Image (spheres, rainbow, N blue to C red):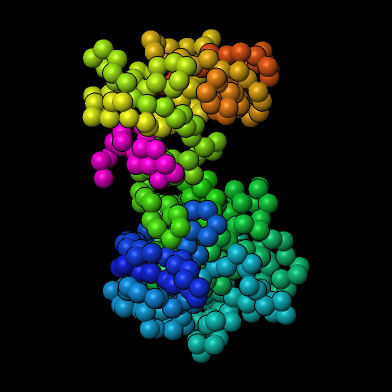
Amino acid sequence: MAQVILEQVSKNFPGGIQAVKEMSLHIRDREFVVLVGPSGCGKSTMLRMVAGLEDVTAGSIRIADRLVNDIPPKDRDIAMVFQNYALYPHMSVYKNMAFALKLRKFPKKEIDRRVRQAARILGIENLLERKPKELSGGQCQRVAVGRAIVREPKAFLFDEPLSNLDAKLRVEMRAELKRLHRQLQTTTIYVTHDQEEAMTLGDRIVVLKDGLVQQVGSPLEVYNDPANRFVAGFVGTPPMNFFAGRLVQDGQDVSFDEGSVKLRLPEGRRLQGRVGKEVVLGVRPEATSLSAEGRFAGEGNTLPAHLVVVEPLGEKMDLYCSTPNHPHIVSRVDARSDIEPGQDLVLHLDMTRVRVFEPGELGANLTRLSGN
């Protein structure tokens, strides 16, 4: 077990491409940290630098308080699980799992103990004599994880390990990985572009964009209190709705002028210095309701909308609507049979849950609760 510390780590590629920019991150001993972000944000490059598969351009990486910048991958005492499993096709499951230990000249008895223990943990004891071509995708992924477990490393590194699995298997393997982490208590760094995976797996998640850390926090902190508009829009399915407008004085309060309506902000006093300025209002789809439901009914928090598309989700349904000034907003409400595209609706917004951002893709959250 070990903490992993990155201090001002950067990675430059030929052609002036800077994949990671002065990243500092402290991953605590036994913690499960997920790096999440869109393609090209630097998350896999960062993981490969920790593994030693990419050189560090600047900064330092420490694993268990040991500087590893110049230490080869095989001597870093980490185990990496790749997206494509990377199993040897001519070897049995047993031999695949034992291979790294055999290279390190472990005694046969110890190799057998570790392989069979890992197989038991993963529920693949009956697969040990099979070849990879005889396995399903989920079974191959379990073998790849087992090959990492037998090494008993200081840290596990996962590089989008579930992206090749179908939706049902991804859900099952997420639960399996979470269970394994609770059982093994090994420091884990996990890379994914799937924010749902990040939310369900991580003790903390690190949101990246263009090689820069945008926010670090628990899944709920990042979801409920995003640092900026990018984080707010990236984390959450469906994503947060955004309304461009400006802040106006409304008696003793501050309201958001959407263009067709004014929405009163309960915590408007914090925004007094922004009155008259352009801002962006963010509201989660589940922080809305239909007029007939009235869950968030009250003065100054309704918005007329035209229903364009209905997506049934069982107990819930997503309503894709337009307003006079905003062509695309999503409302997640309780399922009803009397809702059809083409209807005019009135949406109620829970103004206690909205967030106000500065303009621009990386506009800061002006109503951030944590203040950090």
**Residue drawn 43% across and 12% down?**
297
Q: Is residue 333 visible?
A: no
Image coords of residue 254 (percent x, y): 29, 20
Image coords of residue 5 (percent x, y): 32, 67
Between residue 167 and residue 307, name the one nearer to us.
307
**Residue drawn 47% across and 82% down?**
74
Q: Is residue 369 magenta?
A: yes
Magenta span: helix, strand or loop, mainly?
loop
Image coords of residue 366 (percent x, y): 31, 36
Say if 370 sits above or below 331 in the image: below
Q: Quadrant of residue 50?
A: bottom left
**Residue drawn 46% across and 29% down?**
243
Q: Quadrant of residue 68?
A: bottom left
Question: Is 365 left or right of 252, judged from the image as shown?
Answer: right
Say if 284 sits above or below 162 in the image: above
Query: Which stretch is magenta?
Result: 354-372
